[in-house]
Amino acid sequence: MDFKLILVFVDDDKSDRVLDSARDAGATGAMIVANAQGQGLKKRFGLFGLEVLYPRTILLILVEARRSGDVLDAVTRVGELDETVNTGIAIELDVSRAMGLTEHVRALSREHPVDGNG
């Protein structure tokens, strides 16, 4: 079975909605890395000349390859990732091996059948 890893770097206040949209699109869950910090295109300085780092949540979503397009589209739309340069990003990586997912895939296939084109 082929898998993709979708990494979503999103504003903290959008993470729950993004996770819900990923699940609705066929993801079985995600690993959540809270309180990450990042820089944008340019450094931003605040009070006393200290650099301001944007608080982010990193979502690691392992998904069957045949479902990854739907999941990536959903998180991009709900996270409003294409709206401005400051809204976050999502990337998709190939996974060479993934273990421990047989029952997840079976349950997901019962709840969200994929047509023969997937």
Image: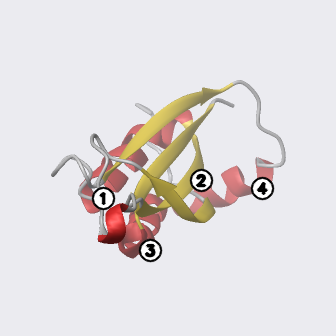
Amino acid tagged 1 = Phe
What numbered label is drawn on residue 86? Answer: none
Amino acid tagged 2 = Ser
Q: Is residue 82 visible?
A: yes
Residue at screen point 36% across, 54% down:
75
Mark 1 → mark 2, Cα distance in angstroms: 48 Å
Q: Earlier in the sequence, mark 3 or mark 1?
A: 3
Amino acid tagged 3 = Asp
Q: Residue at label 2?
A: 109
Horizontal and vertical percent for residue 13? 37, 75
Q: Earlier in the sequence, mark 3 or mark 4?
A: 3
Q: Earlier in the sequence, mark 1 or mark 4?
A: 1
Q: Residue furthest right?
A: 100
To which quarter of the image does residue 12 belong?
bottom left
Horizontal and vertical percent for residue 56? 45, 62
Mark 2 → mark 3, Cα distance in angstroms: 23 Å
Q: Earlier in the sequence, mark 2 or mark 3?
A: 3
Q: Earlier in the sequence, mark 1 or mark 2?
A: 1
- Which secondary structure lies at badge 3? helix
Which numbered disc, 2 or 3, marks the residue closer to the eye? 3
Up the image or down, 97 lies above or below 22; here it is above
Amino acid tagged 4 = Glu
Horizontal and vertical percent for residue 71? 42, 49
